[in-house]
């Protein structure tokens, strides 16, 4: 049996996909896992919400439960990266505190912040097709999700498919510029 001390230390990379609901983040993440050269984990916010028991949450407690879920999700991603795992993070920065929390937890030089954009009409079409999201949710999130305005790379899933977006991200990784978007956002904060 290999002892833990025999595992070489390494900091994991976080590929942080930020976009509205239905923007194509999960599809890009799936393609990245397929094409990246190193083992990688897809950690989606939706997966954390799906892990919660189905015990009814009283309406006056819902915001607290959701806030704690998001905080736990951020800490789980930070822990995986701190242990040396590469992570594709599928997130929606639809509240200011979410970005601030991530900025306080992640090593900013190890984060590639990718803006996943999509035209409103296409978002609405995808919502109708999925049928599992309230109509207009993505459009309502649009302004806040990209309000911070700083990315390392952006993809438009209305113009490019998930495979093309994933290839662009993979091609970007070897020569990532510094300071990263996360470094600039932390310094500005």
Image (cartoon, rainbow, N blue to C red):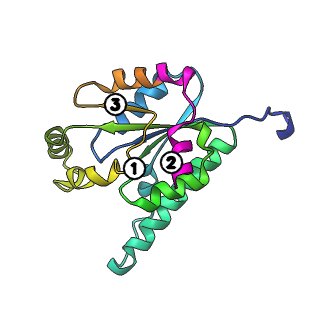
> Residues at badges 2 and 3 in contact (C-beta under 8 Å)?
no
| Circle 3: element type | strand
From mark 2 to mark 3, how far is it between C-alphas? 19 Å
From mark 3 to mark 1, how far is it between C-alphas? 16 Å
> Residues at badges 1 and 2 in contact (C-beta under 8 Å)?
yes
> Residues at badges 3 and 1 in contact (C-beta under 8 Å)?
no
Crowding at mark 3 (Cα within 10 Å: few <14, some 14-19, many 20+): many
Q: Residue at x 86, y 38 (%)?
A: 5
Image quadrant assignment for residue 95? bottom left
- Viewed as shown, does residue 88 lie left or right of 161? right
Viewer can see residue 51? no
**Residue carrying label 2:** 185
Image quadrant assignment for residue 129? top left
Q: Is residue 152 above or below residue 47?
A: above
**Residue carrying label 1:** 148
Among numbered discs 1 and 2, the one appearing first in the sequence:
1
Q: Is residue 92 part of the magenta span, yes or no? A: no
Number of numbered discs overlaid on the protein picture: 3
Crowding at mark 2 (Cα within 10 Å: few <14, some 14-19, many 20+): some
Q: Is residue 49 above or below residue 40?
A: below
State the image coordinates of residue 25 (x, y, percent, origin top left).
36, 38
Name the disc covering residue 25, or none.
none
Image quadrant assignment for residue 56? bottom left
**What span is in magenta?**
170-189
**Residue carrying label 3:** 155
Q: Residue at x 41, y 22 (%)?
A: 168
Q: Is residue 171 part of the magenta span, yes or no? A: yes
| Circle 1: element type | loop
- Viewed as shown, does residue 122 lie left or right of 176? left
Q: Quadrant of the N terminus?
A: top right
Among numbered discs 2 and 3, the one appearing first in the sequence:
3
């Amino acid at each position: 049996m290999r002892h833990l001390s025999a595992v070489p230390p390494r900091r994991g990379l976080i590929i942080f996909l930020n976009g509205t609901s239905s923007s194509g983040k999960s599809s890009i993440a799936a393609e990245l896992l397929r094409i990246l050269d190193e083992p990688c984990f897809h950690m989606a916010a939706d997966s954390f919400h799906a892990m919660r028991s189905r015990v009814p949450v009283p309406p006056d407690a819902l915001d607290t439960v959701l806030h704690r879920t998001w905080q736990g999700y951020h800490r789980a991603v930070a822990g995986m990266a701190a242990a040396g795992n590469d992570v594709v993070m599928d997130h929606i920065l639809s509240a200011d505190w979410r970005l601030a929390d991530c900025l306080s937890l992640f090593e900013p030089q190890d984060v590639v912040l990718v803006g996943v954009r999509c035209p409103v009409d296409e978002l609405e079409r995808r919502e109708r097709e999925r049928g599992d999201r309230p109509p207009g949710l993505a459009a309502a999130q649009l302004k806040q999700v990209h309000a911070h305005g700083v990315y390392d790379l952006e993809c438009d899933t209305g113009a490019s498919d998930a495979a093309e977006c994933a290839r662009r991200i993979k091609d970007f990784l070897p020569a990532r510029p510094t300071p990263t978007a996360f470094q600039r956002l932390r310094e500005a904060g």
